[in-house]
Each structure stands twice: as C-alpha cells, then as structure tokens.
Image (spheres, rainbow, N blue to C red):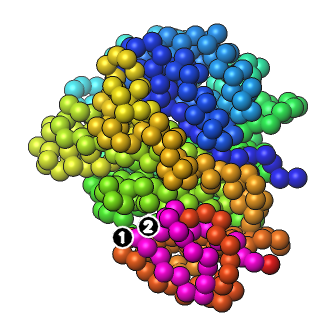
C-alpha cells in the first residue's frame, strides 16, 4: 500500500510572520488559530511549523534554548495543545521543526558544557584546542566557514578552547558521536509525539556526523560566503544515527507520521539511501541543487541569472534518481529562499499571476510530495529592499557588514541581498488590503510588502481565477488522481529554453504537463496521440482542448489527460 504522504500536500507556516493575535508585531499561535480556515479551504493535509520553542531568537528560533517549551513570543504549551486539537479536528496533521544539529548557546546543555573542561556536558559539543600559540592572531582548529560569515569556530576565553558552530556563534553544534546526545534528542522527539504531533522536519540533519578528525576543507575565501561541505555533509555515521533515531522513536508506535530531512549539499546517491524505505531512515529529504543554480561560485548573493535548461535538467535528474527507490519532496519556497515568482517567474504585473500559476503547475505535477510556503499560494513576491537597515536576518546583516569591513562593493551587495535575502520570504503574510495587510494591529517586526493593496488572501478568496484558486485546484487533482503520486515521469523538450513539459503515466492514466516559461507565445508539436486530450487544468481563460500542435501564450500552463 502506498504511504499516505505520497498523495499529501504540506504547508509551511513561519509563525513569526503568519498572523499576530496580540498586537506585538510578531506572529503567534493565537494568530495561526484564527487563520486555520484559510488552510482548510486550501485543502492541504499537513502543516509544518517553523520553530516555536523557547529561544533567544538569534536565528528566529533556529537557536533553541528549551526543547520542551513554547517561546512566550508565540504563546504557551496550552495554546499549542489547542492548536494541535483544532488542526486534527480539521483533518490535518501537524509537523514540528526539529533543530538538533545545534542548540542555542543559551541552552543549559551548552552553559554547562562551557562552564569547565571536565563538566559532564563538555563532550556534548565540539571543543578543540587552538592549533598554535594563544594570542590575538590565534588560528582556528580548521578552515571551516560559518554559513553566516566568518569562521565556524568561536574562542571561549573561560576554558581556552574553540567550539564549533556551522551557523551563528550562538548556535553551537552538538556532538552526535556522544550517545547521550542521541538519547537526549530521541527523548525530545518522543515527548512531542506523546503530545500529539505527527512528525518532524529535521533541520540540516545531514550535518550531524562530522568527518573524523575534522580535517581542513577544500580552501575557500571565507569572506566571500562560500561553504565547503566536505567536512560535515553526509558524514561517516549519519545513516547509522538516523536509522537508530527512527527505530527508537517511531518503532512500535501506531500512527501516520511524516519525517523530512533538510539536507543542504545532498546528492541523489545519498538521497536514495536516506529515503529508501528498507533502510528506515527518513520519508523524504529537501535537496538544494535547484536552489543553487542561480548562485555564482562566489556565493548566493552574487547572482548569475536563471538558465531554464539547467533548472529543468536538475529537477528532472532528481525525478529520475528517486523513481524506483526513495521519494522526492517538491519545493520552490521556504523561509530561507526568495519568492519564486520573483526568482524563476515574472513578477511584472502583467505576467505575475500567470507565471505564479505556471510555476505551481510545474512543481505540483511532478512525482513527490509538494510543499507550499506561506504566501506562495497567493503568489507573494520579493520585497523592494533598498537600504542596509531594511534587512533583519543575521545572514544578511553579517554579509553586508563583512563586505563593508573588507572595503568591498556595497552597492552590489545590496542588489544581491534584495534579490536573495531570506527576509524576502519573511515579510508578513498578506491577508487583506487593510493596515499591515491584516497581519497585526501593531508595528510588524518586518515591513509589509506595499503590494498587499492588491495582492492579498481576501481578494483572492473572492476570485475564481486567482493564484489561490489555482493552488486549490492543483491540490484537489493530487488528491483525486492517483497518477500524480504513482505515475512515471518522462521529460519532453528537455533542451528547450522556454517550454517545460513532461508526462506522468500509470497503467490507467497518462497526463501531459506543458508550460511556456516566457512572455512570448510558442507553438509546439506534441504529437498526434494528444489530439483531443482533456484539459484538466489551465491558467489562462479559454484554454482549448489539445491538438497535435499547441500554441501556448506567455506563461501558459496546462495539464491534459490523454483519452483512453
Ligand atoms: O537552513 C540550512 C541552510 O543551510 C540554508 O537553508 C540556509 O538558510 C542558507 O544556506 C543560508 O545561506 C536551516 C534553516 O532552514 C535556516 O533557517 C537556519 O538558519 C539554519 O538551518 C540553521 O538552523
């Protein structure tokens, strides 16, 4: 029998930016409760919540100081229990974000660990001596860079050693080679499952096993924000640790759960291992190859434009690689990525709606489990960032300060940030055309996009041809037609720089998904077998039935079912 999550659609909420019920300008659990009907009407099956645990919020909750409590910013455990009950009553599931590659430096485990070299928690984190004499120019134990600029090591003057942090210095990496750490993570997961959650999205979970001896990575210029993954991605024990975790946490539990591992740098070969059901590790992974194709070799803020053939080829390779073993997750957006309609689509007002629907059609037609990030179902766009002080995200702020300190090109840095900054995903959800887009009665922590006057949920709920209506239709199709989950995937026109097309087929049904990813109309020959095929979904008015030759308007997107 096919697992339930193969025909499911997941919706990601970034609580800080979703809906604010108490007027402090920061979204909260009460806000989510008030807006659950939007998700019920959309038809999604699962909600994934970005972290709501107690946290100093250095990285907006991806730095956890108490895994068993809710941050007062977001509410209380009682609010959480109410939310779980309401989500379940609406027939949806709730998945937590589990951030256990690292904790906050304010987690009691770390405060103990740093208190002395012989503390019982010392070995819960990764501590190393300086390789040379102490002094102001002291070298780090190896050359690894932090994802948020600078070295991945911070000196602790109290105990005179460095600790490792692949992300911010306020996010020290846990030492998963210590069995007590693995046991502690297991206990956290069981605690949340007992509270009623339906699974976990596991943050950078392919980083938990570092290479033996922490060797230098291929040398890279740290100041250019380039990370070499050699030393920590898909390390020597990662499969063993994940299998152990899954066995000990889920073994013997009845219920329908979902696990998805976030895995920067993961290859198709590794992803097959992580998601092979016979190995009992994870249900699916988030890969990053398609998110990297517009990054330049010198980093994500040095944009190199979109080559559609490369994007298609990347997605198609993942479709093929996980066809017989394993499973894909499908995503364009999350809280770390710029808005897809501005990135791979066309957010010019004339093409905005059609291109948002077209990109949705491409993704949701594929084999895998689609993820929708809040606001994506409305076609929310990037924010018009202009000034350094516009940015809140520590990645953006650190990057800008580094360029400034090194005397680099700050104008280019601002252009890069406007295009790629994670804050693009984090501006408040656009509920209506009113003050603060209906997100908050107070001052929002990040400004609302001025386009909420016309781009908002209320307007789109009322319209039958909105981006929102198109997402609803795609979700309905996936629920109704088994071919979306089960069908083979075959690319068509692979080398075409403008047409994105593929078929999906089972013994009983064949679909054609065909999209014009450009403004100019295109005529293509799709073959006689498609003549008279039934249009299941289109994104433009008056889309015709199929014929041997199709003329596609700008950003025209269609799904046809072959006649049998
Ligand atoms: O992100 C991991 C990650 O590597 C990227 O998505 C990251 O945002 C990007 O590479 C920076 O350039 C996860 C979370 O999704 C992210 O929000 C956290 O900041 C990060 O882990 C640390 O927990």
Visible residue check, residue 224: no
Judge whether 87 appears above or below 349 on screen. Answer: above
Of the pair 381 and 353, the residue shown nearer to us: 353
Q: Nearer the viewer, residue 450 or 165?
A: 450
Residue 465 in sight:
yes
Q: Secondary structure at mark 1?
A: loop
- Mark 1 or 2, nearer chain start: 1
Position of residue 153 relative to residue 298, above or below, is above
**Is 352 on the left-hand or right-hand side of 48?**
left
The residues colored magenta run 539-563
- Observer-nearest of 203 and 563: 563
Foreground residue among 246 and 391:
391
At x 76%, y 59%, the residue is 481
Alpha-carbon distance for marks 1 and 2?
6 Å
| Residue at 41% in and 26% down | 438
Secondary structure under the numbered disc 2 in the rendered image: loop
Q: Residue 511 in magenta?
A: no
Farthest-out residue, bottom: 528
Q: Which mark is residue 519?
A: 1
The residue to which callout 2 is attached is: 555
Characterize the magenta stretch by its predominant secondary structure: loop
> In the image, residue 113 lies at what x, y percent?
51, 16
The reply to whether the C-beta atoms of the residues labelled 1 and 2 are less than 8 Å apart is yes
Q: x%, y% of residue 367? A: 67, 61
Q: In the rendered view, would you say 164 is above or below 224?
A: above
Q: Is residue 414 left or right of residue 192?
A: left
**Which quadrant of the view contains residue 43?**
top right
Residue 247: name its quadrant: top right
The residue at 15%/39% (across/down) is 404
Q: Residue at x 39, y 42 (%)?
A: 455
Neighbourhood count class around disc 1 (C-alpha, 10 Å): few under 14, some 14–19, many 20 upward: some
């Amino acid at each position: 029998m096919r697992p339930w999550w193969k025909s499911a659609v997941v919706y990601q909420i970034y609580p800080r930016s979703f809906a604010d019920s108490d007027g402090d300008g920061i979204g909260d659990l009460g806000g989510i409760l008030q807006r659950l009907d939007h998700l019920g009407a959309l038809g999604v099956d699962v909600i994934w919540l970005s972290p709501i645990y107690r946290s100093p919020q250095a990285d907006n909750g991806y730095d956890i100081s108490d895994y068993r409590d809710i941050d007062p910013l977001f509410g209380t455990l009682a609010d959480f229990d109410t939310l779980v009950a309401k989500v379940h009553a609406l027939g949806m599931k709730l998945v937590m974000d589990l951030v256990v590659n690292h904790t906050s430096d304010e987690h009691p485990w770390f405060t103990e660990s740093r208190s002395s070299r012989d503390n019982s928690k010392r070995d819960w984190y990764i501590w190393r001596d300086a390789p040379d004499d102490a002094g102001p120019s002291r070298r780090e134990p190896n050359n690894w860079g932090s994802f948020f600029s600078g070295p991945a090591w911070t000196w602790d003057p109290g105990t005179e050693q460095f600790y490792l942090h692949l992300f911010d210095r306020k996010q020290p990496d846990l030492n998963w080679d210590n069995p007590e750490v693995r046991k502690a993570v297991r206990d956290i997961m069981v605690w949340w499952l007992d509270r009623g959650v339906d699974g976990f999205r596991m943050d950078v979970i392919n980083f938990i096993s570092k290479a033996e001896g922490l060797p230098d990575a291929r040398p890279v210029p740290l100041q250019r924000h380039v990370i070499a993954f050699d030393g920590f991605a898909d390390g020597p024990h990662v499969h063993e640790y994940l299998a152990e975790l899954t066995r000990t946490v889920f073994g013997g539990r009845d219920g329908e759960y979902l696990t998805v591992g976030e895995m920067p740098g993961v290859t198709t070969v590794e992803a097959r291992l992580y998601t092979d059901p016979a190995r009992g590790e994870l249900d699916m992974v988030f890969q990053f190859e398609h998110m990297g194709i517009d990054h330049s070799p010198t980093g994500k803020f040095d944009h190199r434009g979109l080559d559609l053939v490369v994007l298609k080829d990347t997605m198609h390779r993942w479709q093929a690689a996980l066809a017989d073993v394993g499973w894909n997750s499908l995503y364009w957006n999350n809280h770390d990525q710029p808005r897809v309609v501005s990135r791979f689509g066309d957010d010019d007002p004339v093409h905005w709606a059609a291109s948002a629907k077209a990109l949705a059609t491409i993704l949701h037609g594929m084999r895998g489990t689609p993820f929708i990030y809040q606001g994506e179902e409305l076609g929310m766009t990037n924010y018009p960032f202009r000034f350094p002080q516009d940015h809140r995200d520590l990645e953006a702020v650190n990057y800008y300060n580094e360029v400034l300190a090194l005397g680099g090109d700050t104008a280019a840095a601002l252009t890069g940030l406007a295009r790629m900054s994670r804050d693009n995903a984090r501006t408040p959800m656009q509920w209506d055309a009113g003050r603060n887009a209906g997100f908050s009665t107070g001052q929002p922590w990040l400004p609302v996009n001025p386009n909420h006057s016309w781009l908002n949920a209320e307007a789109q709920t009322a319209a039958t041809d909105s981006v929102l209506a198109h997402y609803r239709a795609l979700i309905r199709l996936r629920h109704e037609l088994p071919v979306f989950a089960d069908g083979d995937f075959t690319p068509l026109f692979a080398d075409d720089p403008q047409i994105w097309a593929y078929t999906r087929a089972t013994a009983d049904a064949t679909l054609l998904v065909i999209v014009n990813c450009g403004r100019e109309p295109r005529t293509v020959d799709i073959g006689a077998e498609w003549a008279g095929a039934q249009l299941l979904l289109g994104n433009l008015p008056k889309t015709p039935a199929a014929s041997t030759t199709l003329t596609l308007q700008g950003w025209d997107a269609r799904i046809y079912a072959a006649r049998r």
